[in-house]
Image: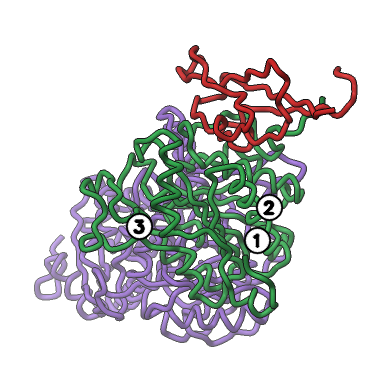
Chain colours: A red, B green, C purple
Amino acid sequence: MAVKGMIVINEELCKGCGRCIPGCIKNLIILGRHINSHGHHPAVFYDFENNCSGCFTCATNCPDIAIEVFKDDGKEEE
Amino acid sequence: MKKVFSRPKSLTKIPFHYCAGCDHPIAHRLIAEIIDELEIRERLIAVWPIGCSVMGDKYFDLDSILASHGKAPAVATGVALGRLTNPDVLIFTYQGDGDMVSIGLGEIIHAANRGELFTAFFINNAIYAMTSGQMAPTTVVGQKTKTCPLGRDPKVHGYPIRMCELLQTLLTPAYIARVALFDAKHINKAKKAIRKAFQFQMDGKGFSFVEIISACPTNWKAKYPECREFIKEKMLPVFPLKEFKTFQIDNEGEKNV
Amino acid sequence: MKKPVFMKGNEAVIEGAIAAGCKAVLGYPITPSTEGLEYAVKRMRQIGGIAKQMESEAAVSHALYGAGAVGIRAMTITSGPGFNWMHDAVDYMATSEVPTNIIDIMRGGPALGNIAPSQSDVRSAKGGANGDYRTIILAPSSVQNLADFTFLAFELADKWRNPVFVLGDGMLGQMKETLILPEPITELPEKPWRLSGAKNRPPNKFIPFDLNPAGLEAINKKLDRKYNQIKETEIRYEAINIKKPDILVVAFGLVARIIKSVIKEAEKENLSIGLIRPITLWPFPDEVINQAAERTNKILVVEMNMGQIVDDVRLAVNGKTPVKFYGRAGGLITTTEEITEKIKEVLNIVKGEVQR
């Protein structure tokens, strides 16, 4: 069974620098067209096909620690 | 679902003031992750510079002191005297290229040469960022800045100064490494070097130094992907990434990367 | 009664520091103070302290900032041209309230000058750097004073969390005299504000910086309140014959000592000379000078410089009495003969009669 993962992007911390985007080999992140309260276009995570593996390359590249990463460890979601 | 990546505990919750795409907060985060992993937060004293990271102290839950421009290694030398009453103390300094390589060049060389027991972090983005974009001693040939608008010309400005190579000529320093942060692979390598540098201090082996090649999107006037290319094409040939041979490492027969 | 010892002024400074619990002497060789650093190298090894020669006075002073912040009693001994480099660090220490002790064995200036004694670093000591900060300044007149005032400097620095300077001069630093060493302290004050690693407490920070102007003004006002308290409680001076002298002399350090000889000699000629010797140059004893000014017709300030504390005297006197100045510079020492002659000139003494 493929490992499931997901990320949560804090839109207010995100400055729209885009460094997370090339790091994601599954191409699951784009810059949004909306802006946050600071005027930045925050990154947005789209994973309709459940491709995220929780590798946290995106979060590693994020200067603002705007991304939290979760991985399925087989336990029930709270 | 298990959380596999989150903010290190040694960082406060204050959002970073740094520009979009800046490498300072990545360096801060890696240092904080190592502090968490080595469980040394309560032993550490941080010495901050004048530069964009002048407010670095507010992001860390650490005893901190702000040094005058370039003087962090001298302040750290004084802080190290605290071991007379607190032998457990650990110290790191954090400086940019103007702070360390220009006004503070004397202090870093002498502190390194005396073998002062602290870890020095050097954020090298080849420009004076806080004062909005003047030439740094590490600005590369041809790079345009506000005080060399036609590009750095060796005939007028000389060549960029390479700190790791300079410190390597001293016999005393124990660990010298140059790393970069432009992708996850290099970030992970940088983290290893930071850990190694702290370990050298904790083992009492001597002065440790990590130069971190960084981007400054605002003053390089480029979005991050362009900055990454500038680092790879223009900076790395001048500032190669590696662990430098030091006298101690050679003596103990340890392998160099 | 402790056994007296016979030593050089520069060495007495170190002994005073050791008695005060000083565990670190940082320094850079500079005439006429270098023996202090050399003596410290020997003595610190004996007491398990650290004596460190660093690469410059700038580095020394910034290391003192770090040492003070971690709660170590540390000091340096230097001279004018070296002292120049320290003002930036002193500024940081004053603003972030870090104690430190700098002993300046003054020499002829300005600039490289020469290595003979002078008193020309007073203005420098008062504040050679930016911003409204104050430093406590003590002025010794003897080798005994050098030991005692260095000891006192450590106490005052910790009490007020402020830089404290001792302004000696090349004569006092180099000469040997008999002295009784201060009694060593048995207990150092607690310093919960020091940097030691944030264990079981919130982090301590020394950050003399606030981008918010209101915040920075608040820091300035807090320091100002402290300085007012220091002015109220730490003024020290010596006063001789100030009830109704023919002339009041104000002098400090070595010159005050010379004036005492002048006073003795002048008694033979029925000349009544008073002396106020400031021991603290900041806070300056303006009150006593202001009061004494009312009881004399002339004031003469004598210094080994071109006129530095004369400004403080004029402010203190506030126009009540004429203030004259006599000084020698470049490393020359004011002799008893010259001073006596000047006093007679100021008093318009003709045919041995004071013109009152």
At numbered mark 1, what does the secondary structure look like: helix, strand or loop?
helix
Q: Are marks 2 and 1 in contact (CB under 8 Å)?
A: yes
Residue nearest the observer in this picture, C134 or C242:
C134
Task: Residue under label 1, please give it.
Answer: B82
The location of residue C157, given as percent across then percent down, is: 54, 56
How many neighbours does mark 2 have within 10 angstroms: few (below 14), some (14-19), or many (20 or more)?
many
Q: Residues within 10 Å of mark 1 (few under 14, many from 20)?
A: many
**As rendered, which of C341 and C59 lies closer to the eye?**
C59
Please give the chain letter of the residue carrying mark 1: B
In the figure, C271 relative to B150: above or below?
below
Q: Which residue does the image show at 48% across and 34% down from the upper left?
A: B21
Q: Which mark is residue B137?
A: 3
- Coordinates of residue C94 in the picture (x, y in percent): 47, 49
* Count of marks placed on residues: 3
Per the image, the residue denoted by label 2 is C196
Q: Residue type at mark 3? A: Pro
Mark 2–mark 1 Cα distance, whole angstroms, equals: 7 Å
**Vertical placement of residue C194 versus C333, above or below:** above
Q: Is residue C266 in sight in this rendering?
A: yes
